[in-house]
């Protein structure tokens, strides 16, 4: 997924804060209203599953974070949903 062009069309981001720190589910949206990304936070750091989507709603990337650091592989998908690459 080419991330830079995707970020240019973002309209809205939703975060939950607790004690001025990101906590829980965060969602970002394209201008069209479709989800761009879903991520989880704990104590202001990414924790758990991270999903990035194409504007057509198809999953484009899947990763996992622990205390703000990516763990394991990143899985990439084509716009038609076909898995194209794993990046360690």
Image (cartoon, rainbow, N blue to C red):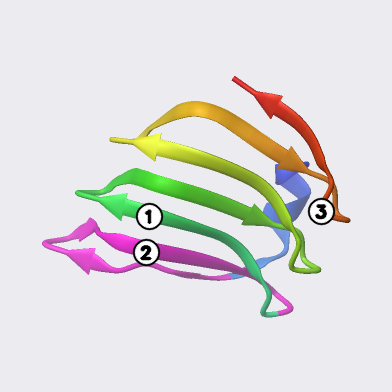
The residue that appears at 78% across and 50% down in the rendered structure is: 5
With 79 as the anchor, is 1 left or right in this view? left
Image check: 72 left or right of 8?
left
Measured along the vertical axis of the image, is residue 85 above or below residue 56? above
- Circle 1: element type: strand
Question: Is residue 41 shown in magenta?
Answer: no
**Magenta highlight on residue 16:** yes
Name the image quarter holding residue 14.
bottom left
Q: Earlier in the sequence, mark 2 or mark 1?
A: 2
Look at the image and give the residue range highlighted in magenta: 12-32
> Which numbered disc covers residue 40?
1
Query: Is residue 20 toward the left or the right of residue 61 in the image?
Result: left
- Closer to the camera: disc 3 or disc 2? 3
Q: According to the image, label 3 marks what residue?
A: 81
Q: Residue furthest left?
A: 19
- Image location (x, y in percent) of residue 23: 25, 59
Q: Which sits earlier in the primary sequence, circle 1 or circle 3?
A: 1
The residue beneath circle 2 is: 25
Residues tagged 2 and 1 counted as in contact (Cβ below 8 A) = yes
Q: Secondary structure at mark 3?
A: loop
Q: CA distance from mark 2 to mark 1?
A: 5 Å
Label 1 Cα crowd, 10 Å radius (few <14 / some 14-19 / many 20+): many
Kindly indicate whether the residue at mark 2 contacts the one at mark 3 (C-beta within 8 angstroms): no
Name the residue rendered at 66%, 36% in the picture: 75
């Amino acid at each position: 997924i080419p991330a830079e062009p995707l970020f240019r069309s973002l309209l809205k981001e939703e975060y939950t804060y607790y004690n001025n720190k990101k906590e829980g589910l965060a969602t970002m949206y394209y201008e069209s209203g479709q989800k761009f990304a879903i991520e989880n936070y704990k104590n202001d750091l990414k924790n758990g599953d991270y999903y990035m989507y194409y504007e057509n709603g198809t999953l484009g990337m899947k990763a996992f974070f622990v205390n703000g650091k990516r763990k394991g592989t990143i899985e990439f998908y084509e716009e038609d949903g076909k898995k194209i690459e794993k990046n360690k």
